[in-house]
Amino acid sequence: MVRAGGTSMAAAGPTLAVVAREAGVSVPTASKVVNGRDDVAPETRRRVTEALERLGYVRRPRFDATKAPTLIDLVVQALDSSWSGAVLHGVEEAAYEAGLEVIVSAGPARTRAGRPERGWLDKLTARGSSGVLFNLAELSEAQYAWLEHHRIPYVLIDPVHEPPAGVVSVGAANWQGGVTATEHLLALGHERIAVIAGNRRRMCSGARVSGYRAALASAGLRPRGEYVRHAGFDEDTARQRMRELLDLPEPPTAVFACSDRMALGVYSALAERGLRVPDDVSVVGFDDLPEARWGAPALTTVRQPLAEMAATALRLLVRMMHGDRPEGTRTELSTRLVERASTAAPAARSAVRR
């Protein structure tokens, strides 16, 4: 079986016999090192460990097909955000309904050579997880190949990049969300509308900007290149991009920030200049995280159903663990605008006060 880039399942890693030959030991000795046995000489352990790392060996899974699935892994990019909290909540509720336990971890890491990081992969197989949910993960070709080679069902939640053909994923209708945010500002009478997008490499960021451009074009407005700025989905870089927009000869009267965290950075930059939301500049975010309601004023934003996305991914994974392959590989859940107090008609004066 060949995946994107010509990586075959056989390329997922060497056998233990190959590792043993490389280290100059017997297969049983190499097996003792892999399984953490302490009856191995230190020098022998060092040679085997170096061979394991050098060859990118990963332990073969020991799943028992006669047993019903009881455990899955949820791999998240970070555990310290309300974004991840919403995803975890959705997975936990759906897992409870399905009678599954969930192991949560941050990762997966990779070596400098791009191989799957052994520690995380070994833990996955050692505990016998029946499937994996990846949230915002950037998987390498080697990691995709490893999962396929070991026949581990997996689903991506909001993948960072376009996944290879046949990989099942769940996300939000990001393009439509970008359209909705921009149409809302247009309906209020704004024409000088800027967008502060996330990382250029992120699939969701590109879709939201495309929706923004489409809405402007439908209104007969030419998207202005200087009004499109890229940040990193964080407050600090969004604050800097907003400063740049305010320094333009003709600054925008409205901003679509492609995440709520970036919208808070926009708030901060406006406050630095003595500008008010929405009196001087209207702001729309994206996500509808708890932070959107805490701002002053409360943030108008596009809600993406994070918990529902996670629960949908879990249900798809359960089907796959029982051998039922979904008909489609991409599931998109609808977004919707949540109007609060951060948007209003543009001020009568022709330029934003700086």
Image: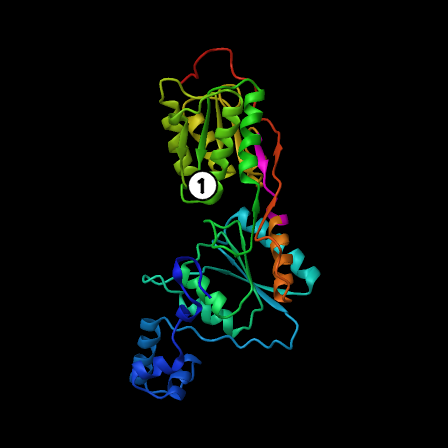
Q: Position of residue 10 (x, y in %)?
A: 42, 71
Span colored in magenta: 298-308
Q: Is residue 276 above or below residue 126?
A: above
Examine the structure image and report whether residue 20 is included in the region drawn in magenta. no
The colour scheme used here is: rainbow
Examine the structure image and report whether residue 305 is included in the region drawn in magenta. yes
Residue 341 shown left or right of residue 250 in the figure = right
Q: Position of residue 19 (x, y in %)?
A: 35, 79
- Within 10 Å of the Cα at label 1, are there few (<14), some (14-19), or many (20+) other Cα atoms? many
Among the 4 quarters of the image, the one containing residue 50 = bottom left
Q: Is residue 228 above or below residue 117?
A: above
Q: Given the image, on which type of amino acid does mark 1 rest? A: Phe
Q: Position of residue 301 (x, y in %)?
A: 57, 33
Q: Considering depth in this image, is 103 or 210 the residue closer to the camera? A: 210
Question: What residue lies at 32% left-to-right and 87% top-to-bottom?
Answer: 25
User: Pointer 1: what residue?
Assistant: 233
Q: Position of residue 106 (x, y in %)?
A: 47, 59
Residue 334 shown left or right of residue 260 in the figure = right
Q: Is residue 299 something that shows in the picture?
A: no
Q: Is residue 84 above or below residue 15?
A: above
Q: Is residue 40 something that shows in the picture?
A: yes
Question: What residue lies at 35% left-to-right and 18% top-to-bottom?
Answer: 249
